[in-house]
Amino acid sequence: MKKTESRPKDLLGLEYLTKAQIEEILNQAKPMKQLFTRSVKKVPALRGKTVALVFFEPSTRTRISFELAAKRLSADTISIAASTSSVQKGESLIDTVKNLEAMNVDYLILRHSSSGAANLISGEVKAHVVNAGDGAHEHPTQGLLDAFTIFDKKGRFDGLKVVILGDIAHSRVARSNMWALTKLGAHVVVCAPPTLIPPGLPDIFEGKVTVSNKVDEALEGADVINVLRLQLERQKENLMPSIREYTELYGLNLSRLALAKRDCIVLHPGPMNRGVEITSEVADSHQSVILNQVTNGIAVRMSVLYWLAGNPSLSHSSHVEELSRMETGQ
Ligand code: CP
């Protein structure tokens, strides 16, 4: 197995990864996912390592998913939240993570409300830093698991029309999706009211992202729709007349979904606000892959943790079988 030379220490955003690096992580997530079908869902790849989950914003999926990913690689995990940490007593983020590193933590998985928080600590510690969502900047593992789910269902990225529908301006998920999917060859259409779309996207993404304020036009012929919630906690002013009006004009319902291709899949990173950005009929339909995203997230995060440690690339299930046999002594 060939060791890849130029891996970054940290995963701060998909903007900073090449197409080949993204593909390497996605390919390696496939054998990781095969582990989930076994009675022993664990390999010893990160035995002896410690993963710190530093979550200064609420999370259901990402925190549990990283914890399970670390445990399935046999790492130890510790968890710290702002509400129960010395941040409450005025300690800085940098001092907090330096203290964790002094306790020999190998990975710092950080969720923070400030854009750039993961970049800030990256240069301050030797531990691998993984951005688990920083303000409206990036959520790289969400972008990777969305890409993994799309490839799992569609078998390609080239030529796909992916519509990201919702609050683009305040969404780190939208940014990570745009970086990953445009590098991988898809065409992305972002759709929202003008007040919820940041300026300059077509230029930033070199024409691979199109902006639309007309939902019916945007959804026409879509292969994938990724629905985002309104990030009301990040909006500092009234950017739309009312939530009811947003639902009427931009919410994804069955009649709007019918404008897309018949085999269009629907993603949502969660948490969902049913009846606001998406109806229950769509969220629970056979076209919805929302719970597949959650399952795939564990495999993708295992792949990220394993990859950052500089381990040899795994792209075949036999490699994971080898790791499993080491664990069980077969
Ligand atoms: N998708 C996502 O980040 O969900 P959580 O906020 O529950 O982690």
Image (tube, grey):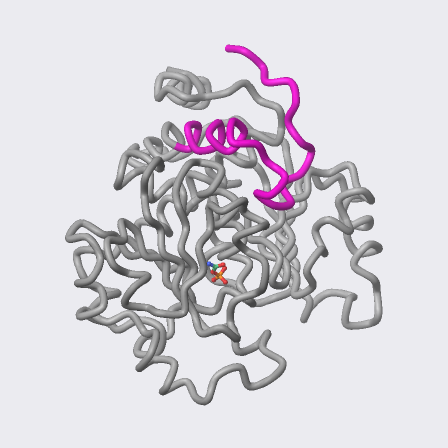
Q: How many marks?
A: 0
Residue 17 lies, with reference to residue 193, above or below; the image says: above
Quadrant housing residue 165: bottom left
Residue at 48% across, 54% down: 64
Quadrant containing the C terminus in the rendered view: top left
- Where residue 153 sits: x, y (%)? 26, 41
In the picture, measured across the screen, residue 51 lies left or right of residue 283, that is right
In the picture, measured across the screen, residue 187 lies left or right of residue 4, that is left
Quadrant housing residue 280: bottom left
Asked whether 81 or 114 is in front, the reply is 114
Residue found at the very far top of the displayed protein: 1
Residue 280 lies, with reference to residue 144, above or below; the image says: below
In the picture, measured across the screen, residue 226 lies left or right of residue 179, that is left
Asked whether 316 or 242 is in front, the reply is 242
Residue 89 lies, with reference to residue 115, above or below; the image says: below
- Where residue 96 sits: x, y (%)? 79, 56
Residue at 72% across, 56% down: 117
Residue at 57% across, 65% down: 198
- Where residue 267 sits: x, y (%)? 33, 56
Residue at 53% across, 36% down: 304
- Where residue 174 sits: x, y (%)? 49, 57
* Residue 261 highlighted magenta (yes or no): no
Asked whether 97 or 268 is in front, the reply is 268
* Residue 15 highlighted magenta (yes or no): yes
Query: What span is in magenta?
Result: 1-29
Quadrant housing residue 136: bottom right
